[in-house]
Amino acid sequence: MIEEKGTILEITGEGLALIKTEKNEACDGCGSKEICRSVGESDMVVEAENPVNARVGDEVVFTVAPVEMLRAGALLYLIPLIGFIAGVVLGQVAVASLAPSWNADLLSAALGFLFVALAFGGVKIYTGTTARESAMRPKIIRITKAAG
């Protein structure tokens, strides 16, 4: 598990807490980033499950499952790459069979970039629909310092 520290800003009625934490490099590839919001240059607010009943002002440690980090990496890098390759190959095949007088390289590049855009759109839709799943949501595991 990847552990991060933060301070509780707000408790919601759904057993969730909003945590202010420092933004780091892992944030870019995180599967839970759809439920986080940037606050300035170095901080972000994360929505996490609150099974330890932390209160506003408590300093807590929360986790994000590493499998979600790997899944996010695959979604952000592998799917668009596969889309690009599929577009390029389709462009070469389509020009060779349907329009041999067209420039195959130009059409392949255009289809490659179109498929990348479609892949990113699909990833955005998919992450938007799965962001609220419990498996992807960070979870508070302990309180390190209770509020005054």
Image (spheres, rainbow, N blue to C red):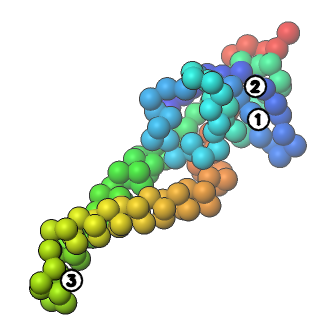
Closer-to-camera residue (93/137)? 93
The mark that comes first in sequence, 1 or 2, is 2
Q: Do the residues labelled 2 and 3 touch (CB within 8 Å)?
A: no
Left or right of residue 71: residue 103: left
Q: For the point 49% across and 26% down, which residue is it? A: 24
* Up-down relation of residue 38 to residue 76 (above or below): above
In the rendering, at what x and y percent does residue 18 appear? Answer: 74, 33
In this orientation, which residue lies closer to the viewer: 132 or 92? 92
User: Which residue is the extreme one toward the top?
Assistant: 148
Q: In this view, does 141 lie above or below 22?
A: below
Q: Residue 122 bears which disc, if any?
A: none
Q: Which quarter of the picture shows residue 115?
A: bottom left
Q: Distance between the residues labelled 2 and 3?
A: 56 Å
Three-letter code, disc 1: Ala
Neighbour class for label 3 at 10 Å: few (<14), some, many (≥20)? some
Label 2 secondary element: strand
Which disc, if any, is residue 8? 2
Residue that carries the numbered disc 1 in the rendered image: 17
Above-or-below relation of 95 to 148 = below
Q: What residue type is labelled 3?
A: Ala
* Residue occupied by mark 3: 94
Foreground mark, 3 or 1, reads 3
Between marks 2 and 3 in the image, the one whose residue lies nearer the viewer: 3
Q: Which structural element holds mark 1? A: strand
Q: Which residue is drawn at 47% across and 38% down?
A: 28
Tags 1 and 2 touching, CB below 8 Å: yes
Give above or below for 89 relative to 48.
below
Residue visible at 36% across and 66% down in the picture: 114
User: Mark 2: which amino acid?
Assistant: Ile
Tell me which numbered mark, 3 or 1, is placed earlier along the sequence. Answer: 1
